[in-house]
Amino acid sequence: MHGRLKVRTSAEEAARKKLEQQQKVKMFRAAMGRILEKKTAQEYDAEMMELTAKLLSSNPDIATLWNLRRLCILARPEGEDSSAVFDKDLGFTEMCLMVNPKSYCAWHHRCWILENAPKADWQKEVDLCTKYLKLDERNFHCWDYRRYVVEKAGVTPEKEFTFCTEKIEKNFSNYSSWHYRSKLLPLLYPNVEDPSRPISEEKLKEELELVLTAAFTDPNDSSAWFYQRWLLGYAQPELDLAACRIDAKQNLAVLSFSKPINLATGGYKLTVSCCDNCNDASNWMPATDGNTFDTTWTLKSAFAIKQDSNPGMVSIVTPDTKELTLQLQTIQAEGAVGVKKPKFGYEFGSAIVDVLKAQLASCLELLEYEPDSKWTLLTAALLMKAIDRRGYHETIRQHLTKLETVDQLRKGYYLDLASKWAIENRLEQWIEAGTLSEGIDLSGLQLSVVHYTPYLATADAINLSENRLVNRNLGVLRDLVFCRRLNLTNNAEELDTTVLKLPLAEEIIHNGNEQQQLAKELPTKVESLVL
């Protein structure tokens, strides 16, 4: 019938697309073949620029082609207007970013151009970022690039903070803007009284109120919940001394840290006030053979303990001149020991606690309407821990148990979080008791992983029975340098303890017949705290 367009059948359409794809592949291979020929001949000329531009304009994620363009620019003929060359390639990268605004290679090439151009208009780049973020306000590549160019352009943190606030108010679901905000706040509102805290108490109160509004606008969006977690201090721990024990009878010393470091680099200055032959950091060895970076380091030597050291301190200055210190609680002729209580979170003032209680009440109210809201359940647990982790202990456990069902894809995360918080209670009481070279009871906590092992490096005995540990959990136990008796009975499955290389181990048991014998030797002071 005349005047009507013929509609292709599915078979015809598939054949047409296949032919079109074959032609594209043929053209691409021909162009790449020619490019590689010129690369081999080191012909970085106008033809190379044209060929790379042809391919990158349709696929800007080929890093090799961007590298060749940079070689062409550097090999340009003498006398050629360099400003024009760089400006032209800036325009080309902008065209490529229109094809793919999240191209790592294109953004990286733009940075290279600006760093190498005779003149760079950094303010123009800031304006370009503003333009791109209007098109896609969650383009994290552009946010990263913006942080780079605003520093070059000299834009004040105050202006950038205002920009962030506008973006968040327009759309709360903007993780990149929340993240940028967390970088700007310590610059604008530092905590003068406590430098270890990122922002002042007054500003923290305002931010908590802002993030609550955002979180309750869309409880299923994770952006504001993650920002709130940062405000509450749930972040990766900073490098710090964890524990130290020097045993003159065993001729063994241990020094452990909250994060892995490389003491063998020679950039660390160590001072142990009660032990002169402990002060050469290069003599210490990692607890795990073959490790370069480790949390736990050991030293074998004949130690002479100076009992008149008062106060007994361990001090280490890092290569970036940051000093870490640890108070030794016990100094005797046979040895010295000290363990620093980890930071389990921020300790807030009464004004902040009142805000947190109000937020917790709001979370609990929301849970009445949406009992399976995973972010609300998790945030309620985090708020309880920040307010009173011991008082809310059982309720927190109930929330995490429910999350294992509500959010089964992340069940392992909730199990590990419950394990971490359970150990915190036992570890804190053990440190407060001051028996830092004696055993610690971590049995019956339903642990799926063992956290804080660097802080247990001084203990003679560890009871980990009645938990859910499997073979892959044993690796962290390498930090238990002074452990003589390790009880692993009644865990999730039969454990292969042959992988454990503990220098002083006398007894490692993992069957029910031997559990009772060892249990009598382990402390029972914390039996009332069971998670």
Image (spheres, grey):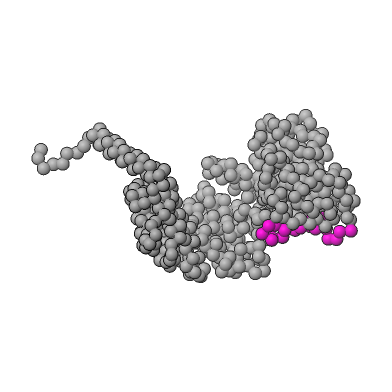
Q: Which residues are magenta?
A: 308-330
Instruction: Say whether residue 60 is left or right of residue 177.
Output: left
- Residue displayed at 16% across by 41% down: 5
On the image, the x and y values in percent for residue 236 come to: 62, 53
On the image, the x and y values in percent for residue 484 come to: 80, 39
Q: Quadrant where the C terminus lies? A: top right
Query: Is residue 427 in view?
Result: no
Residue 309 part of the magenta segment: yes
Q: Quadrant of residue 307?
A: bottom right
Instruction: Say whether residue 344 is left or right of residue 17.
Output: right
Instruction: Say whether residue 211 is left or right of residue 426.
Output: left
On the image, the x and y values in percent for residue 222 come to: 50, 53
**Front-most of residues 523 and 23:** 23
Quick one: which residue is furthest to the left in this view?
A: 2
**Front-most of residues 38 and 496:** 38
**Front-most of residues 262 and 370:** 262
Residue 77 part of the magenta segment: no
- Residue displayed at 56% across by 50% down: 377
Instruction: Say whether residue 287 is left or right of residue 59.
Output: right
On the image, the x and y values in percent for residue 39 come to: 41, 45
Total number of numbered discs in the rendering: 0
Query: Is residue 292 in view?
Result: yes
- Residue displayed at 75% across by 50% down: 282
Quick one: which residue is furthest to the front in this view?
A: 78
- Residue displayed at 27% across by 36% down: 19
Q: Quadrant of residue 290?
A: top right
Q: Quadrant where the N terminus lies? A: top left
**Front-most of residues 198 and 254:** 254
